[in-house]
Each structure stands twice: as structure tokens, then as C-alpha cells.
Amino acid sequence: MRVEIKDYEALSRDELYRALHLRDLVFVVGQKITAEPEVDGRDPLCEHALMYDEDGLLVATARIFHREAPMIVGRVAVHPDRQGQGLGTILMEHVQAHLGAGAAELHAQAHLERWYTRLGWRRFGDVFEEAEIAHVMMRWPGIDKV
């Protein structure tokens, strides 16, 4: 597996298309999220983590609002055909190494709270609804895990 983290301006048109397509497969098609547009106009404000398999196919992605304080991680998505194979963990380990000692937050789907906790994230606050799905706020303590 190969993971790259690139600023929006460094993405090729094909890389951006593939990332948006993968997020559409996971969130819009797979989870039926329609209350909030997937393509929200905020991608130019982010760095994008892109994970490719040995054949060069994009299998996972995430975005990082690296200019925010704290940074914000979002749109973590693994291709539906590749979920449950540990790819999300590998991707997040790279994202966390990229965050380094910097503080970060994310909105985790509530059913993924234990997974994020195992990766070192800590929940704060109550459960809330986002795009008609239960979520929790999680914080990254800035500990280098990779």
C-alpha cells in the first residue's frame, strides 16, 4: 500500500476525481447520506490523504483541514469492496503521523468510536446527529503513533 498526503493544489485532476468518487461510493451510495452534500466546496481548504493498492487503485481517502487550530480530519472513507481489511487503520496511522504533535478533532460516526479510540483518539461531548447519523466528537492528543 502507498499513502500520499497532498495539498489540494498538488492534486491532479484524476486524483481529485477518484477521491470524490470514492467518497460518493462510501457516503452517498453506501450510507445514503443526502442531507448534506458530499462535495461541499471545502476540499480546496484541505490536504488529502490518498491510499493506493498495489495495482494503483485508490482504496481509501481522508481530508485534513491543516490550517485550522485544531486541525480537523474528515471524510475518512475506505472503498466498500476493501472495508474490513485494516486499510482504514493504515490510512489513519499515516494521517496521525502527519498530524504529529498537533492537536486535531474529527466527527466520528458513533459506531466507529471504539475503532478511533484504539487508534488513540479520545471522545468528548455528547452524541449528536449529522447527516441523520449519530456522531461523536473525537480529539487527537498529538501523540506520534507511527
Image: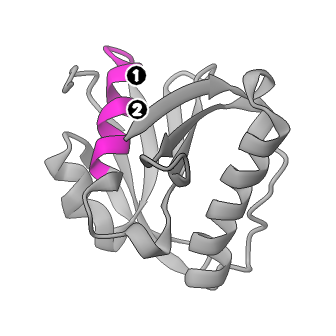
Q: Secondary structure at mark 2?
A: helix
Label 2, label 1: how far apart the Cα atoms are: 6 Å
What residue appears at the point 20 percent right and 44 percent down from the top-left corner?
A: 119
Between residue 36 and residue 80, name the one nearer to us: 80
Say above or below: 99 vs 13.
Answer: above
Write down the residue under mark 1. Answer: 99
The secondary structure making up most of the magenta span is helix
What residue appears at the point 56 percent right and 51 percent down from the top-left corner?
A: 58
| Callouts 2 and 1 close, C-beta under 8 Å | yes
Quadrant including the N terminus? top left
Q: Position of residue 10 (x, y in %)?
A: 75, 22
Residue 131 falls in which quadrant of the image?
bottom right
Say above or below: 51 vs 95.
Answer: below
Between residue 54 and residue 88, name the one nearer to us: 54
Q: Position of residue 72 (x, y in %)?
A: 53, 36
Residue type (three-letter) at the residue carrying disc 1: Leu
In the displayed structure image, the side of residue 11 where residue 52 appears, left or right: left
Q: Secondary structure at mark 1?
A: helix
Q: Residue furthest left?
A: 118
What residue appears at the point 54 percent right and 40 percent down from the top-left corner?
A: 50
In the displayed structure image, the side of residue 121 where residue 75 appears, left or right: right
Q: Which residues are magenta?
A: 89-102
Q: Position of residue 138 (x, y in %)?
A: 35, 47
Write down the residue under mark 2. Answer: 95
In the displayed structure image, the side of residue 129 where residue 47 appears, left or right: right
Q: Position of residue 73 (x, y in %)?
A: 50, 40
Residue type (three-letter) at the residue carrying disc 2: Val
